[in-house]
Amino acid sequence: MKTLLSPGAVVRSVSDTVCRFPLAVAAVIVGAVLFLMAIHDFEINYRWVPFLGVTVSAGVACVVAFEERSRLWGHLAGVGVTLLWGVRCLLLPVDEGDLSMPQGVEIGVVTMVAFLSSFFVAFLRRDTDAQWWNFAARMLVRLALGAIFSGILFGGFLLAIHAMAELFDFDPPAELFNWLTAGCFIIFAPLYVMAGIPSGDAKHDSEQRPAPVLKVLALYILGPILAVYTLILYAYLLKIVFTWQLPDGWVSWLVTTLGAGGLAVMLLIWPLRMRGENRAAELLGRWMGVVIAPLLVLMTVGIARRISDYGFTPNRCYILLLNIWFYGIYAWLFVVRGRRVKWIVISAVVVALLSSVGPWSLARVTPRADKDKPYTTETMSSRTEAWKAWSSDSTLQVNTLWRLDHSYTGFMDIFWYTNASQEIFGKATLSVEEGDMVIRLTETGREFRVPFDQVTKQTTVRGDDFVFIVGSCYGNRSPDSGEIEVHHLEGYLFYNDEP
């Protein structure tokens, strides 16, 4: 223990991590520096965040994939991926407010794919499932420990600073807490995780070791919950058969939860099944796909009903794609008797990448409006244009951009903009009342009523004391009840300082 905790051991661990993952470590350091610059009022472009996030993951994944052949090739591959992603980030809008939904989806998916690829890129060959499972399990444990330890470090130092402030009667500078955040969460946490990524024999350990805690989690916690979901859905399926009524669209979310939970259980119980030590694990792994198959059909019918009633939207297309993927992955697991579980993760990554990156992505090719529901497209390309259009009007307070991504009544962030700065101004709620969209500022209670029909037909809506430039609006309007459901609303709101 003394050797493990000695300063020399710590230095060697850090040195080995830097030598093994130099690109990822450099990205972590740059990220910490930019974070500290941002809190000292330096303007940092938002494109640095996705760029550095992918760079860290790519720097790890490429080394893990190639280090048995040539670590140099791993470093070169990481640099190549980073350069390609850097070019893509440079092509993003300079202003974060101009980032489109497809671009946002692409950034999120690429970041997720880069992160998850570290878990499997070294185990794409056949008969490496046991090695992959052990490697992925150790990676997840290391990630959890990194989060816990960094939180403990932050809390411990924070308490020490507070104690010193109370005992010695001084006010610690605000920057001190930001430096502490950078040190604990931006530097220590990722370096600790990278230092614990298995290598050598530990990386290719193929011994099957069922963990008791995972057995309890899978069979005695997740298992009963999924059983309840299954009973509820089968009861609902019987109700549909007897009443001959199409399923409600909401059922898709419950089937999605059941499908994802079932795959998680199959991953957790895999060592138990391979060792043949648990009959319940064997039954679950073998027949889970058969049990869920009728419910996947129910999910398909529910999605088809929503599309038939309201048309295609990106959300519905992604849910439909998820439904199709469930069919494929459960059929595959049934054929291979639940033995090739690593393809659960690999196939999910491939499907997400192919469906979300490129000009063919679902977010780009799917119209964002519902059938027979009016909507507007983007009318202002940037907040800069809005500023130029309205800042000269002395009767209007300069400009407030607000965005909503919730259905029905939801909270949204209100931002106050000037020519060169942006800061959060407060919160607001949106509700639909008698055909009007009502925006209420939470702090002041200020209320703006915008007729829904005007929002969907005009680019500018004028009230007695405000002007609203419509950016985009889409959602549902029930043809029977006239009920309005707003999925997305965006625009520039200018209003007098005093009502």
Image (tube, rainbow, N blue to C red):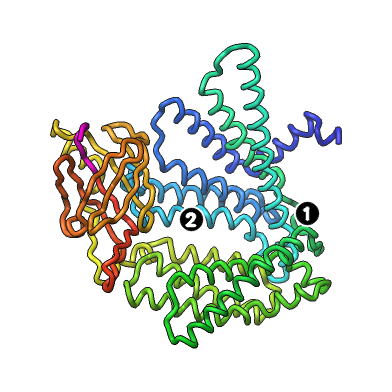
Residue 387 in view, yes or no: yes
Q: Residue at x 32, y 72 (%)?
A: 310
Left/right of residue 467 with respect to residue 243 in the rendered view: left
Q: Is residue 239 above or below residue 394?
A: below
Query: Could you say whether the residue bearing mark 1 is in a helix, strand or loop?
Result: helix
Query: Could you say whether the residue bearing mark 2 is in a helix, strand or loop?
Result: helix
Q: At label 2, which amino acid type do we have?
A: Val
Q: Residue at x 44, y 47 (%)?
A: 86
Q: Is residue 494 magenta?
A: yes
Q: Which residue is mark 2?
A: 110
Q: Is residue 213 above or below residue 341?
A: above
The magenta stretch is: 493-499
Q: Within the image, what quadrant is residue 389 found in?
A: top left
Q: Tell which of 284 and 138 is nearer to you.
A: 284
Q: Is residue 381 above or below residue 307?
A: above
Q: At label 1, which amino acid type do we have?
A: Ala
Q: Position of residue 139 (x, y in %)?
A: 69, 52
Q: Which residue is mark 1?
A: 202
Q: Tell which of 448 and 121 is nearer to you.
A: 448
Q: Residue at x 22, y 64 (%)?
A: 374
Left/right of residue 137 with respect to residue 327 in the rendered view: right
**Picture quarter with the C terminus:** top left
Q: Tell which of 38 and 312 is nearer to you.
A: 312
Q: Residue at x 70, y 79 (%)?
A: 286
Kindly report the distance in space between the C-alpha atoms of the residues bearing marks 2 and 1: 29 Å
Q: Position of residue 295 (x, y in %)?
A: 54, 78
Q: Position of residue 60 (x, y in %)?
A: 61, 49
